[in-house]
Amino acid sequence: MKKIIIVALFITLNGCSADEAVKSSGNDNTILTPVSATLTVDDKNKSKESVVNNSDSMDMNFNNANGDIESSTYTIHLNKNKFTTKSKVLKLNQSIYNLDINNFGKVKGSLVVISIVEPKGFQQDFDIKKLADKTYQLTVKSAELDLYYWYKKLSSDPAYSTVELEIDYSPSTELKTH
């Protein structure tokens, strides 16, 4: 009698967990294997090509009448988050979309770095302000400066343990036009 109860309990528990696994895999949109797809639409003057895979970026490319390729969005990594933007160049007050928190933000025009030594050699492009011990804020002097270039450059320098681009997530109607 005990064996029958144990077997019935075992079958019941395994059956319930199998149903839950099937239900959760049916509702979950995760991709378990690498997938790549290409969509091409030919028009009279433009051909639109979209390449989608499960890597870091999704780009929409347009071939204009001259055969030049133009990208409509770019996926970039900043501050340990993934963002989309219309340009590879990030400038002061540019709107970007944070894919991790699903929110628009505006580039504030400054970088915060943590370094043992004070950042030097940047006075031509940045105003440098000490925020705390080993923490400095580099604020752009020109609104035309490419902050993404400087973010990548400082991030790759071993003298800086942390580099973050300041982004304002305050609600605003202007932010929604990235």
Image (cartoon, grey):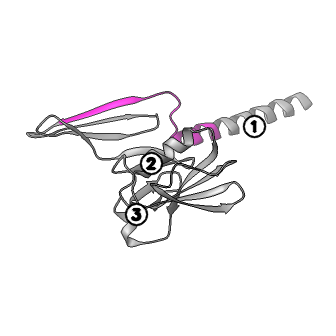
Q: Eyeballing the image, is 17 above or below 78?
A: above
The percent coordinates of residue 131 (x first, y second) are 65, 63
Mark 3 lies on a secondary structure that is loop
Mark 1 lies on a secondary structure that is helix
Three-letter amino acid code at the position of disc 1: Leu
Q: How crowded is mark 3: few (under 14 residues within 10 Å), some or many (20 or more)?
A: some
Q: What stretch is highlighted in magenta?
A: 20-41
The tag on residue 148 is 2
Name the residue carrying label 1. Answer: 13
Q: How crowded is mark 2: few (under 14 residues within 10 Å), some or many (20 or more)?
A: some
Q: Which residue lies furthest to the bottom in this view?
A: 172
The CA span between labels 3 and 2 is: 13 Å
Three-letter amino acid code at the position of disc 3: Asn
The percent coordinates of residue 49 (x first, y second) are 25, 36
Name the residue carrying label 3. Answer: 93
Mark 2 lies on a secondary structure that is helix
Q: Can residue 1 be seen in this view?
A: no
Residue in view at x 38 percent, y 40 percent: 58
**Front of the two marks 1 and 2:** 2
Of the image marks 1 and 2, the number of the one nearer the N terminus: 1
Residue in view at x 48 percent, y 51 percent: 99
